[in-house]
Structures are given as structure tokens and as C-alpha cells.
Amino acid sequence: MTDDEVDFPPGDGPTSGISVTLTAGTLQAIRERVGRRGVSAYLEKAAQRQIERDNLDELIADFDKVHGPADLEAVAAKRARLTGGTTDAGAAA
């Protein structure tokens, strides 16, 4: 069985080399943060975070289909309760 036939969760399994094209500014910013030898690890972590966000977006969309969109006033009230802030129904949920 080859690695292509096995389902690995993000962040697991053997590493594979690929070619990635980035704008010069993006690559420069990454290298300034992590150095030349840390680019692959940085991109791996960034890709994992993006996959988590995509999965969360899909989960929220599925929830909204079943239950309807969130009540912004209720979200603001719960956010205020969690953060100790004031309720602001105009804040982004």
C-alpha cells in the first residue's frame, strides 16, 4: 500500500516535496519570520490552520442550513458574558 492510498489527517504521515509559487513579498515576509530553513514548517502549519478554518466554515454552514443563522443579539450577549465586555449587537459575530 502506497502513501497515496492511505488517508492521513492533516499534520500526520510522511513528508512529501512539492513546488509552491508565492509572491516575492509573501516569501520575504515568511523568511523574515522564520528564516530560510523554516519556510516549509511555516507553510505546513499555515495549511493546517486553513484546513481547520475551512472545516469550521463547512460545519457552520451545515448548522445554519438546519437551524437558521445565528441571532446576532444573542451572540453579542454571549460574547460580552465571556469577555466581560458590553453587549454590542452591531459587532460582527
Image: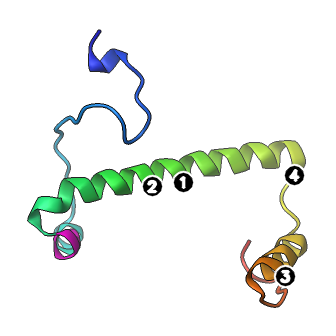
Of circles 3 and 2, the one toward us is 2
Decide which of tag 4 and tag 2 comes sooner along the chain: 2
Q: Is residue 8 left or right of residue 3?
A: right
Element type at marker 4?
Answer: loop
Going from N to C along the chain, the mark reached first, 3 or 4, is 4
Q: Residue at x 80, y 83 (%)?
A: 90
Residue situated in front as seen by the camera: 36 or 19: 36
Q: Earlier in the sequence, mark 4 or mark 1?
A: 1
Q: Return the mark for residue 49.
A: 2
Q: Which residues are magenta?
A: 30-34
For badge 1, the amino acid type reads Arg
**Cβ atoms at labels 3 and 2 below 8 Å apart:** no
Between the C-alphas of marks 2 and 1, the distance is 6 Å
Distance from Cα at disc 4 to Cα at disc 1: 20 Å
Image position, residue 42 (x, y; %): 27, 59
Residue 68: image tag: 4
Q: How many numbered discs, if any?
A: 4
**How far across and how far down the image is residue 5, in percent?**
35, 15
Q: Are marks 2 and 1 in contact (CB under 8 Å)?
A: yes
Q: Is residue 89 left or right of residue 61?
A: right
Q: Amino acid at mark 4?
A: Gly
**Is label 3 in a helix, a strand or a loop?**
loop
Residue closest to the eye, 89 or 78: 78
Give the mark nearest the N terminus, 3 or 1.
Answer: 1
- 55 left or right of 78 in image: left
